[in-house]
Image (cartoon, rainbow, N blue to C red):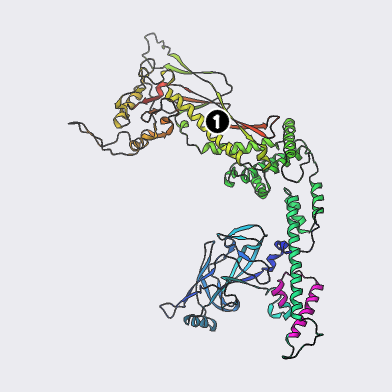
Amino acid sequence: MMKKAQTRKSDFQIRASVAASLKDFFIEAADDVSPVITPTDDPAKPPTFDMKCYGGGKLILSGIKYPVVVDLKGLQVTAKSRPVLREHEAKRNIGHTTEIRNNFRTLEASGVISVDNADSKEVISASKNGFPWQVSIGAKALKVEMVPQGRNVTVNGQTFSGPVLVARQAQLKELSFVTLGSDDDTEVRLAATVAKTKGISNMNEFEKWILATFGEDHELTDDQLKDLQATFDNAQLALKTEPGKKKSADDEPDPAVLLQAKTDEYLESIRASSAAEMERIDGIKELCEGHSDIAAQAIKDNWTLEKTEITMLRASRPKPRKSGAADAPAEALVIEAALSMNSGFLKEDEAGKLFDEKTMNAAVDVLRDVSLRTLMVEVIQASGGHAGNGRVTDAMIEAALKADMMIRAGGTSTLSLSGVLGNVANKYLLKAYNTVISVVEKFCNQTDHMDFKVHTRHRVTADGELVDLGKNGEIEHGSMSEDTYTNKVGTKARMIALTREDMINDDLGVFKDLVSVFGRGGSNALQRAVYTLLLGNAGNFFHTSNNNLLATAASALSIDALTAAEAAFLNQVDSKGLPIGITPELLLCPNALKVTAEAIYKETKVNETTTANKPKTNENPHAGKFEPVSTPWLSNAAIPNASAKKWFLFGNPDSAPAIQIAYLQGKRRPTVEGGNGNFNTLGMEWRSFWDFGVAFVDPKAAQRNDGE
C-alpha cells in the first residue's frame, strides 16, 4: 500500500512562492571586516570607502525556515554606480559606489561618500573614532531554487547540504552602512523586509511573534492561529501580573509553558507535513521518470501518489506510431543529440556543429531526462509496446531488442535502438579518429573504389615532344605508352558490445570508451598499413635502378644530403630519357630528425663545418622549400625496417602520387554498424569496420634517403 500524502502546501513547494517571500532582502555583514573609510588629501574631495559585502556563504533569513545562499553568478549589477544609504532608507543617501567587484566567490565594492548631510557626517566621524560599521546590500530575488535534504549543491565555490535555498538570480539595488546586528556570531546575517507586503512596524506583538517563530509562509490554519492567539494573550497577561502576587493551588498551568508546548506541537506538525511532502514529491519523480510534464503538474496540483500512478499508466499505454510520421525523424534526432551530450559523447558546442538549431534547442530542453533507458522506452512505445515506469530490467531489455528488430524490419522509422546508438557512436568515433595525429594524407593520394576487386590503374606516359616538320608537310605522330599499378580495398574490423549489465545500469560509459578506442584504432590501422608499405619497399619501389634511393652515410639529413636528394629527384627522366619535371614539396622524417628538418626549412642562415681551403656560404639554399612533416611511425619498432635515420622527399600527391590510399565507396572514416547480439546474449553488438587499401604508384614521385 502506498502512503497517502498530505495535501497541505509544504516547505518543499516553496519553489513557486519563495521568490515572493524574498521579494526584497538585506545582507548584513556581521563579521570582523568593517568598511574602510579613507579621507582624501584634498579637503575639498569627499572620503572614499572599500567594503566586503558578501562572502558567498549561508545566510539566515528571518521568516524563511531554511538558510539562503545568493549565487553570485546570477547577481545582476545594472551599473557600477549604485546608491549608498543609511539603514536601507532611501531618504538617507550618503554616497555612491564607483566600482563593484564580483569574482563569483565574494562581493566587494568601492565608492565615495559624496553626499554632505548629517548621516554622512555621522558615518565619517564614527569611523574615525573606531566605530565598527557593518555593510548591508539591498537586493531583489528573481529566481530561487530549493535544494532538499539529502542533496548537495555547489555555489560560489562552496558546497552546501540541503535543505537550503539558492537565490539563482537576484538584482542589486543599493548598499547601506548599518549599525551592529544582534547576531555577532554569524559571519553574514540576512534580514528580510516585507516592506512591499506588510511592514513589521505595523504588526502587533502576536503577529511579530508568529513571524519570528513560524516564518512569513507559516501555513497555519485559522483555527490554529486562534488557538495560538489565545495562548499567547494569556502568556502576555501573566507577564503583566503584579510582582509578588502568589498563585493558588487551583491556578491553571503556567501560560508560558502552555504556549511553548503548543508552539512545539505545531512546529512538529509542520515538520511532519514537510516530510510527507518530500516523500510525495520523491514518489512522483520516480513514477514519472521520462515524463517531466506530468511530474510538474502532479507536484503543483498536490496529486496523491495513487492519482499520479493512474495518470502515468494512461500516458504510457501503447500508442503505435504511424509509418512515415512526420515527427519521427525529428524525435529520433532530438534523442540522438540529447543522448550524445548527456552521456558525454559530445560537448554542446560539438553537437551544435552536427545538428540543426531546432534539434539542438529541443535536445537541450530534455537533456537531463534523456538516457539509455529513455531511448529503450521510446523504441518500445514506437513499436506499440508497453515499457512500464520502473528501472531497466531483463524484460525491458528483451522488449526493446524485439521492438528494435520490428522497427528495422519495417524500414519506415528512424527511431530504432541500434540506429540512434549507432549514429551516436559514429559521431563519437569520428571525434576520436580526429584526435589522432596523422600525416599520411599529406603525402598519399586518395581515391575511391566501388567494390573489393583488384583495380588496375594506368598511368599514361607520352612522347609529345615537338619535332621538325618533314619536307612533305606530314606531321609525325607522337607515341603513348602505359605504366600500370594495382590497388585493392580490404577490410579492418572489430566488435563492440553493449552488455546486459551496462543496459541495466543505464550506463553508456563502457560503450563510449570502446567506441573511442576503435576510433583511434581506425586511424592507427591506416597509418600502420601506409608505413608498413613505405618501409617494406615491396617490389623494390625504392632502388638505385629507379634513381630514387641514396643509401650511404652521406645521405644523413643535412643541407648537403638534401641538395643531393633534390638533384636526384629533379633528374628523374621518362622512358625516352627526358626530364619529367616533378618537383619535391614535402620532407617526411622520423621524430628524431624533426628539429633538423624544421631548422633547414625555417633558417635562412646556417653555420656548417667546412673542409680545408673550401669555404661555404652561410646562406641556406633550402629555406622554405620542403615542408617538414615528422611522424613516430617511421622509427616505431612495430613496423618492419623502421629507422630513426631514414627520410623521404615527396612530390604533390594529387599530380604525382607515390602512394595511393583507396577507400570503398567514399567512406574515408571508420563506421559503426550494429544490431542485436547472439541468441544466448542479452545485449547488443556493433561492428566497427573500415574498408581501404594502400599501394605504390610512381617511383619517380618519391626519394628515399637511408642516412647510413
- Give, as a three-letter code, the residue at label 1: Arg
Using residue 416 as the reference point, say whether residue 549 is left or right of it: left
Image position of 252 with respect to 698: above or below = below
* Residue 684, horizontal then vertical, whole percent: 67, 34
Please tell me in which quadrant of the rendered image residue 376 appears.
top right
Q: Does 336 appear in magenta?
A: no
Residue under label 1: 668
Using residue 544 as the reference point, say whether residue 674 is left or right of it: right
* Residue 403, horizontal then vertical, whole percent: 74, 35
Q: Residue shown at 66%/62% (left/top)? A: 163
Q: Which residue occupies the foreground of this view, 397 or 146? A: 397
Question: Which residues make up the magenta segment?
Answer: 209-238
* Label 1 SS: loop
Q: Which residue occupies the foreground of this view, 575 or 280? A: 280
Can residue 197 be seen from the camera position used here?
A: no
Image position of 45 with respect to 52: above or below = below
Residue lying furthest top: 472
Q: How many marks?
A: 1
Q: Residue shown at 67%/40% (left/top)? A: 503
Q: Residue shown at 58%/36% (left/top)? A: 514
